[in-house]
């Protein structure tokens, strides 16, 4: 799946968050989006899957402009796109296992036995074995994030958007997640967008790095180019993450 | 002056948006009934919430409403020597008016407020967005079971409150007016016609549909922030209560 965003605008009242974002995400590549807190990274991810509606601009998913579709038309498209929410987005009334099984059950994919198998497999993959019957409210932030990733993987998406997937994880676990993101991308060709603050992972996983600043993408390039960017804002941003 | 006009304009725009949104949610919830089969677990859970869990409150309120109607009308009528018609007054008013309205109001305050708070919390916690992100329709998953559970259970709950209320009326009548409860019940059954029952129960369906949809709508449109859920819950109850009374008047006016 590829994404092309043209002249995207989004405001909340007087808060002009995005002011003309242009961005292309290539099929099968990992695109990392960086930017200060409150820059609009989460808003951008939500716009890409149509959870929020832009004020202006176009968003093409595989050539289809989703800003022209209504919610009922977008819903089925989302089955093949996963979003790992910054806050996890788990259903608090369901157990960990039920959360992962939810999309499968609701879309009637697989028998009960098959669903159980998929749930167990994803739990194992995310290092959550035995947490099946825990309630999300009893989990740490990092664990909720992993459950959220497990739930996204249940539907075998073509594209996954990760909103700060390693925030709140200890370094070894963060590295595991990075490896998992790369593995899914390389092995299954999952188109990937990652929002992160983690300098390590930026340069480890990215094919392309983009920086969102003051409502526009001010820099976009290969990790090496990005690292040596002459743009002051980028330099300062990298410097701040380094220290 | 201009500011005032602008403000009025805003209020009307908001009003149209809200009522439009509520109507859309109403028709979608009706249409989504075709998926009720795969959501039976949710429907049953909500039916338990709307019906069973409200029984204690409905009993108490139904009982006292019947007692009050008997008391107020009974003392007056006794002076006129007409205390034998107290039974029909209690039966009529409980079945056609007090039962449906009072039960709907306490349900709006308890069940409706609960729906608004629950969906409001889910909205603020991005749980609703998470459903949408998985391609799950939140109206089908969250609103439809609540709506149909209310439509199914509200008449039952009302019927129960009516029976308790009539019983309360008979207690008061026998204690204060010296009417034997067999005599009272005999008069009740003679007074009530089938059309009274269908009229009363039809009203409960309308009221139930209104408060469940209004409450779900308020929940789903909750704004982020600390006071968001509280505000939605309050609005759900206030709007539901108002609309129940308005609808009650117009139903009485045109169909009564
Ligand atoms: N649903 C919303 N309603 C109002 N304002 C919002 C909403 N979502 C995000 N914002 C605002 O948009 C700005 C960008 O938020 P966000 O995308 O979460 O930033 P970040 O880059 O840290 O992820 C913030 O000022 C935030 O308050
Ligand atoms: Mg964010």
Image (tube, helix red, strand yellow):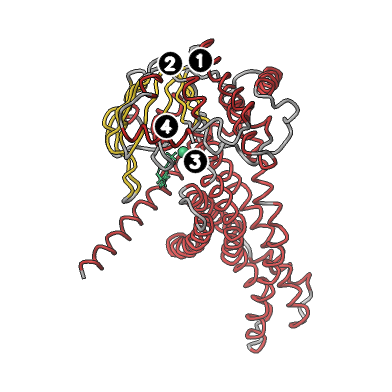
Q: Is residue B217 above or below residue A194?
A: below
Which quadrant holds residue B84?
Answer: bottom right
Estimate the x, y position of residue B115 in percent, counting from the top left: 57, 51
Q: Nearer the viewer, residue B75 or B51?
A: B51
Dot 2: within a 10 Å radius of its alpha carbon, few (fewer than 14), some, or many (20 or more) residues?
many
Q: Dot 3 falls on which chain? A: B
Image point 68% across, 19% down: which residue? A121
Q: Nearer the viewer, residue A188 or B188?
A: A188
Q: Can you tell which mark lies on residue A53?
A: none
Q: Dot 4 falls on which chain? A: A
Q: Earlier in the sequence, mark 1 or mark 4?
A: 1
Residue beneath label 1, please?
Answer: A185
Q: Do circles 3 and 4 both sit on a common chain? A: no
Q: Do circles 3 and 2 both sit on a common chain? A: no
Please say if the residues under marks 1 and 2 sit with CB atoms less than 8 Å apart.
yes
Mark 2 CB lies closer than 8 A to ligand 1: no
Residue beneath label 2, please?
Answer: A29
Q: Do circles 4 and 2 both sit on a common chain? A: yes
Report the Cα–Cα distance between label 3 and label 2. 40 Å
Q: Secondary structure at mark 2?
A: loop
Q: Secondary structure at mark 4?
A: helix
Please say if the residues under marks 1 and 4 sit with CB atoms less than 8 Å apart.
no
Residue beneath label 3, please?
Answer: B29
């Amino acid at each position: 799946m590829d994404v092309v965003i043209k002249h995207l605008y989004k405001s909340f009242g007087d808060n002009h968050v995005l002011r003309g974002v242009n961005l292309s995400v290539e099929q099968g590549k990992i695109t990392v989006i960086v930017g200060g807190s409150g820059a609009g990274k989460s808003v951008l991810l939500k716009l890409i899957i149509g959870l929020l509606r832009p004020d202006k601009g176009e968003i093409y998913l595989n050539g289809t402009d989703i800003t022209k579709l209504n919610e009922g038309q977008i819903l089925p498209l989302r089955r093949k796109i996963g979003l790992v929410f910054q806050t996890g987005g788990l259903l608090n009334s369901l157990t960990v296992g039920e959360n992962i099984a939810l999309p499968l059950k609701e879309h009637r994919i697989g028998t009960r036995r098959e669903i159980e198998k998929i749930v167990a497999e994803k739990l194992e993959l995310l290092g959550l074995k035995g947490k099946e019957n825990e309630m999300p409210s009893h989990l740490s932030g990092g664990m909720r994030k992993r459950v959220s990733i497990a739930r996204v993987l249940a539907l075998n998406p073509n594209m996954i958007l990760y909103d700060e997937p390693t925030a709140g994880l200890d370094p070894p676990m963060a590295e595991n997640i990075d490896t998992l993101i790369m593995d899914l991308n390389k092995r299954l060709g999952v188109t990937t967008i990652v929002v992160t603050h983690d300098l390590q992972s930026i340069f480890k996983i990215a094919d392309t790095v983009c920086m969102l600043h003051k409502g526009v993408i001010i820099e976009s390039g290969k990790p090496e180019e990005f690292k040596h960017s002459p743009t002051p804002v980028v330099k300062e941003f990298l410097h701040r993450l380094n220290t | 002056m201009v500011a005032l006009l602008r403000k009025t304009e805003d209020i009307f725009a908001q009003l149209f948006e809200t009522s439009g949104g509520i109507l859309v949610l109403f028709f979608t919830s009706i249409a989504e009934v075709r998926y009720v089969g795969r959501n039976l677990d949710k429907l049953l859970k909500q039916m338990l919430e709307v019906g069973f869990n409200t029984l204690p409150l409905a009993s108490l309120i139904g009982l006292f409403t019947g007692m009050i109607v008997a008391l107020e009308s009974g003392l007056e009528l006794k002076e006129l020597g007409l205390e034998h018609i107290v039974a029909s007054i209690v039966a009529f008013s409980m079945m056609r008016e007090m039962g449906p309205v009072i039960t709907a109001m306490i349900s709006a305050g308890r069940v409706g407020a609960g729906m608004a708070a629950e969906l409001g919390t889910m909205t603020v916690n991005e749980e609703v967005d998470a459903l949408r992100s998985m391609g799950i329709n939140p109206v089908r998953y969250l609103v439809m079971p609540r709506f149909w559970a209310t439509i199914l259970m509200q008449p039952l709950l009302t019927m129960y409150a009516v029976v308790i209320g009539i019983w309360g009326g008979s207690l008061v009548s026998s204690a204060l007016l010296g009417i034997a409860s067999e005599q009272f019940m005999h008069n009740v059954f003679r007074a009530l016609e089938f059309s009274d029952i269908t009229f009363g129960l039809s009203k409960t369906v309308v009221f139930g549909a209104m408060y469940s949809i209004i409450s779900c709508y308020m929940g789903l449109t909750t704004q982020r922030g600390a006071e968001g859920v509280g505000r939605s819950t309050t609005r759900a109850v206030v709007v539901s209560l108002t609309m129940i009374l308005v609808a009650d008047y117009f139903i009485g006016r045109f169909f009564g």
